[in-house]
Amino acid sequence: MKNGVFTDYKVFTGNAHPELAEEIASIMGKPLGRSTVSKFSDGEISVSLWETVRGIDVYIVQPTCDPVNDNLMELLIMIDAMKRASAGRINAVIPYYGYARQDRKAKARDPITAKLVANIIMAAGADRVVTMDLHANQIQGYFDIPVDHLVGMPILARYFKERDLEDVCVVSPDHGSVTRARNMAEFLNCPIAIVDKRRPEPNKSEIMNIIGDIKDKNCIIIDDMIDTAGTITNAANAIKDMGARNVYAAATHPVLSGPAIERIDKSAISELVLLNTIPMPEEKKIEKMTFLSVAPLFAEAMTRVFTNGSISKLFDTER
């Protein structure tokens, strides 16, 4: 490091999403760092670094997606390996931050897993976290190290702007996503609507009412993640039943577990636009899905971290 700026950096990856890591490293003009992440016969994770990282600014690209426990442990062990190899600074690049849905005590005796995972990542030795669209913004405060929180909405909004749709209305699938919907509506210069729903139990939702005018509109439902797809497909079907012309959906994190693919395929959604923060097996992809890459945004953010550039200016540029 010279004058407070690192003179070199390297990008590494575990097994969670090597394709995204390759794309990011390629944009940054670097080959991926040489490492091996494997398992012992009993399932324990083994990490080996095959090049020096002493005094280097290192970036570990590893979303903590399914299998979440394996991918989280890979990230932690890689961080530990970097620390013990005297890396200059260890940046955990987590495009999808798992265990984020329990971010507070919603009822008695609930854990706060988002804080627990933050504690573990810091204890392992990470110096910085770069992530995207946390399930709750306050999770940034669970870390006592810098967190660069990137936003996926502008990537999705630009895609729909290029589609040049008429009579657009951005729809929030619940009250928690209203800010995201409002930001996208400002980008597209269109009105918003809100789905008022009740969730009787986890992973199940019931549509109650639509707040706003969606009749004869091209509606775009935006959310941070789609898991079992109950929320977004129920919203899409209700909007279509209430007179929407077409229903599009967009989300940053395609978790898509359980019956998600079948629900989306049978729903009123015309097109589902997703970001590639999580790898998607070919057998899960269906015709109405469109994938956009987050690699250019992460590459630019990581470059600015390395050069001590402004991340907030990046947000201004994206909007």
Image: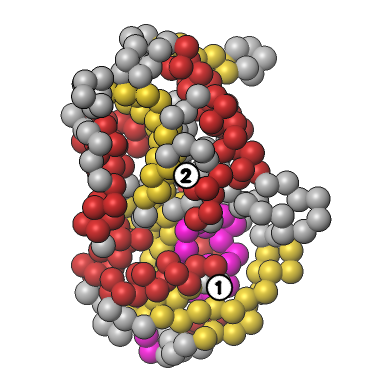
Residue at image position (23%, 27%) is 5
The one of 116 and 76 positioned closer to us in this rendering: 116
**Residue 2 coordinates in the image, percent (x, y):** 21, 20
Give the amino acid at mark 1.
His
Question: Residue, x 21% and y 67% (percent of image)?
Answer: 162
Residue at image location 38% in from the left, 44% down from the top: 148
Q: Quadrant of residue 169?
A: bottom left
Q: Tag 2's secondary structure?
A: loop
Q: Is residue 108 visible?
A: yes
Where 237 falls versus 88 (above or below)? below
- Pair 1/2: label in front: 1
- Which one is nearer the viewer's eye here, 264 or 31? 31
Q: Which residues are magenta?
A: 216-236
User: Gap between marks 1 and 2, in whole Å?
Assistant: 22 Å
Q: Can you identify the residue that label 2 sits on? A: 96
Q: Position of residue 91 (x, y in %)?
A: 39, 30
For residue 146, side relative to residue 174 (left or right): left
Q: Position of residue 48 (x, y in %)?
A: 45, 11
When the figure is inspected, residue 107 is found, relative to residue 62, above or below; the finding is below
Residue bearing mark 1: 175
Residue 234 located within the stretch drawn in magenta: yes
Is 4 left or right of 199, judged from the image as shown? Answer: left
Side (left or right) of 63 relative to 245: right
Say what secondary structure mark 1 lies in.
helix
Instruction: Give left or right: position of 306 versus 213.
Output: left
Which residue is most to the front? 3
